[in-house]
Image: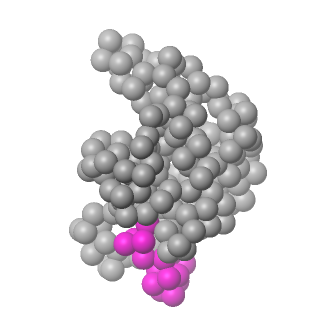
Amino acid sequence: MPEVRRLLTPIGETVGEAIDWDSIQSAYGTAFPGDFREFIDRIGSGSIEDQLVVLAPRLNESQPDAVSRFSRDAIIEADRYEGWESREMAQRYPLAKMLIWGDTVGADTLCWFTDDPDPDAWPVAVFSRSSLMWSLHRCGMSGFLTQVLTGDLPDSPLSDESLLGWGEARFLHSRDEKTLYEAGIDPWE
């Protein structure tokens, strides 16, 4: 977590989220990885350079911009198109065991594969909208973001590689971004 915090500069007034992690764990039926909890507590949910969005858990995961599971329809559709290199990988990493924590400007989906009882061991799974393929990354969310920003992500799965190797990047909390847009101000211009 310290590396990704060093790379992100908050540009709005809001920093961090006040999350009752016990209630969130109860609502989702699982704990969350430590690096993610620290990220949300210290930085919050929001956008990195208007290219990648980090979502926050909410007591109702159907709220906009909330960490969520795939819909039942998406899981059924996945039976027809797996998007993995092999049928074995598709069976090993089913959508029903994924939790979405972010997305990108290229419409990529950033998830954890939650099969391990230890959330800190959850790998990041990315669905690339451009290749229509899944990839698995044996690191946590903070490690994944650090690899994206430093350009150390082997075989980037991102459809839009604008952030790849960006280095230090601006972060805007979702509340500040919404307030600015509602005032007619594009915070990214």
Residue at the left extreme, as displayed: 73
Q: Position of residue 86 (x, y in %)?
A: 52, 83
Residue at the front extreme, as displayed: 22
User: Which quadrant would residue 6 be assigned to in this image?
Assistant: top right
**5 sits left or right of 25 in the view:** right
Q: Is residue 169 visible?
A: yes
Q: Is residue 131 visible?
A: no
- Relative to the observer, which residue lies in front, 30 or 64? 30
What residue sits 58% from the left and 41% below the top? 39
- The quarter in which the N terminus is drawn is top right
**Residue 168 drawn above or below residue 123:** above
Q: Position of residue 115 (x, y in %)?
A: 50, 74
Which residues fall within the magenta stretch?
Answer: 84-98
Q: Magenta segment: does it hold 150?
A: no
**91 sits left or right of 2 in the view:** left
How many numbered markers are drawn?
A: 0
User: Which quadrant would residue 77 be assigned to in this image?
Assistant: bottom left
Q: Position of residue 43 (x, y in %)?
A: 56, 33
**Residue 58 drawn above or below residue 96:** above
**Residue 169 drawn above or below residue 85:** above
Q: Main secondary structure of the magenta part?
A: helix
Q: How is the image coloured?
A: one colour
**Residue 117 drawn above or below residue 1:** below
What residue sits 39% from the left and 26% below the top? 175
**180 sits left or right of 114 in the view:** left
User: Which quadrant would residue 162 be assigned to in this image?
Assistant: top right
What residue sits 42% from the left and 71% below the top? 97
What residue sits 47% from the left and 80% below the top? 90
Q: Position of residue 183 (x, y in %)?
A: 32, 12
Residue at the bottom extreme, as displayed: 88
